[in-house]
Amino acid sequence: MWAHFAVKTMQATTDTQAPAARLPHRSESHHPSRWLALLPYLTLPLFLVIIGTLVWLTRAHDREEQWATLINDVLWMEQNLQFELDRNVSLLGQLGPDLLSDEPYSARVDASLSQLLRAQSGLVRVLWLDANGRLRGAMPPLPADAPVGDVEGALLDHSVFQLARGVGRRAYGPMRQVADGSHQFEVHVPIYSEEAFLGAVVGIYSMQDLMLRELPWWFSERYRVSVLDADGNEIVAKSKVAPLSSDIRYSMAFDPPGRGLTLQITAYQGETRWVPLLLVGSIVLLAGIIVWSVWQLRRQLARRHRAEQALRRESLFRKAMEDSLLTGLRARDLEGRITYVNPAFCKMVGYDASDLIGRLPPMPYWDPEHIEHTLEVHNMILAGDAPREGVELHLRRRDGARLDALIFEAPLIDADGKHTGWMGSLLDITEQKRARELARQQEEQLHATSRLITMGEMASTLAHELNQPLAAIASYNTGCLNRLEQPDIDAEELRDIHIKLGRQARRAGEIIRRVHDFVRRSEPKREPLDVNAVIRDAVGLIESDTRKRRMRIETDLAPRLPDVPADPVMVEQVIVNLVRNGMDAMRDNPPGRRTVRVSTREEGGQLVVRIADTGKGIDAEAARHLFEPFFTTKSEGMGMGLNICRSIAELHLGRLGFESVPGEGTTFVLSLPLQTSG
Ligand code: ADP
């Protein structure tokens, strides 16, 4: 995951500039963005308050309008009622003289009366009284037992009659409830004939009828009209529905008929006005959505901010890591063009990033001496065949110094999973190689030294060995000279002596050659080697020493062994060492048990040399340290022999091991592969 991210960021960065530098710095962006984020929170409530005020103002305006309409309508209604009542009074006044005359009234008057009662006037009955207030007639006619006159529960109020007669104009009576529960009131209209008071015509109104008849349908659609008595009790109401608690209500004195009556008009709650309601609702909803989305946006921003912070941290971390890396990093696109180098790479090759980015091969840091091989490796990498264990390349620094690098390549994959190039990491192994070379040289030196030491140890026996052929040569030479002084020289005899002399000289030469070969410091070389011959040589080399120490070397060499690719001197050194160790181990053995047995076998693709002694053996403690350098149990020993032997075996991809029974003897086993692999 991280690698992916890192690679992607690297792709985007084509120079060594930190990607962090491209990200806005926290303090730069923080304050304005905070204000920006707060702005909706500040403006939204303001917006809502304004909208609320607007709605309230509209409603207030609506109410005012409603109120104005109500007053208008009420005035109209009042006028209308007044007009009707007045009209009825005048009609009653007109009928009065006919009704009160002594003659029976005409059919026309009867028709007019009927008309008046039938018409929507609110009048339920008309009565006419003579000047003394006595009932003269009624329409519709009264039942015979109807209480009339100034009596308790009388149909008419005599005081009203008196009032009408007194003031000479119509007078309204008080409201009264009749048997059927309805409310009635009367109006007395005094009738005069040439200044003489004839009596009065009385109209009895049913309050319910008046309301029902006089108010048009549309009025009762809009308003509830009710009449209250002086105590505020509702006497009658005209309404479709029950009273509502509306605050748009108008009360006025109901005069005439007066007498404390109040007319109350209440506006019905207008039908719900859906459009403004919906409008307000949607505004509130939208405001809610805005608040919600701003909040979501803020959360999103916060998340983004966190992600940015994480990214910045990550890039800074990566940058620090990149800068601290000793490994050179270098990215290339699919054509091999350099797209990125890290500081370690620049330091390694001595070129600036700007010198390298965008370059196509051959690169300036390629070693001119190895340009072809480098190009081959380059093409191999681009073809995707770079070995996983890395490739070693010889490069050259800008100052001309040699640079040995170990290169590992990995494909660069972008966020879409597309292969965009290659990322290579370079390890500077120049020093390592130098150290390795030095170690190799030192090891070789050590080998040579150890050989010298071995030779030093063997010097006296060698001298002794050389002494033999030299003494023989000298004596043969003396013999020859003696023969030469004699007159009859036997040529045959002389020849024989010379042959023997020559053999001794060759023998001495052979000894010297072996010593020379052994001591000569040489590079390890692999040549087809007859190990049996090497063993014979080695045995020849230490033979005299063996004799001197009264030891024996027995060889049991398998015939027709295949050659082994190995260095003869090194293998000989191993054999000499192991045989000498065997002899050392048998130092305290009785004379009969002083034999080192050297055998060769071919076993499973390996050539196995066994050097067996019957010495003191190796105990567990010694076995643990046997191959460590400078481990020795001998007073004159150096402790390097086995260590060197094992490194020689490993140099030939072979092995050196041992089997030992303390007190009985030890067998060292050297196995060398018949074929060099690789
Ligand atoms: P050095 O011969 O100088 O001591 P080596 O590395 O050849 O050094 O041997 C290390 C030690 O291993 C010897 O000192 C000896 O104790 C032990 N060792 C080697 N070969 C034998 C053997 N064949 N039998 C018993 N001990 C042995």
Image (cartoon, rainbow, N blue to C red):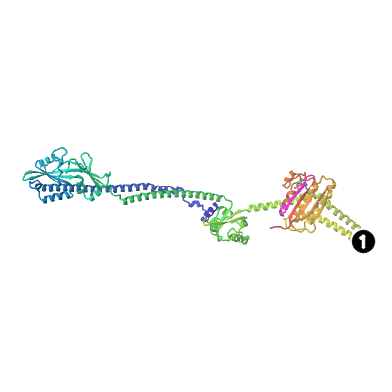
Q: Residue furthest top?
A: 152
For numbered disc 1, what is the local secondary structure?
loop
Q: Is residue 377 above or below residue 170?
A: below
- Membership of 379 in magenta stretch: no
- Membership of 658 in magenta stretch: yes
Left or right: where does residue 576 sit relative to residue 36? right
Q: Is residue 26 above or below residue 159?
A: below
Residue 454: horizontal and vertical position, in percent? 77, 50
Q: Residue furthest front?
A: 144
Q: For the magenta stretch, what is the residue range? A: 647-663
Left or right: where does residue 28 sit relative to residue 639? left
Where, by quadrant of the figure, is residue 162 drawn? top left
Evaluate whether residue 376 shows in this view: yes
How would you rate the neighbour count of disc 1 (Cα within 10 Å): few for under 14, some for 14-19, many for 20 or more?
few
> Label 1 sits on what residue type?
Asp
Where, by quadrant of the figure, is residue 474 drawn? bottom right
Residue position marked by numbered label 1 in the rendering: 490
Residue 519: horizontal and vertical position, in percent? 76, 53
Residue 515: horizontal and vertical position, in percent? 79, 54
Q: Which residue is at the front of the view, 347 or 479? A: 347
Left or right: where does residue 398 sit relative to residue 676? left
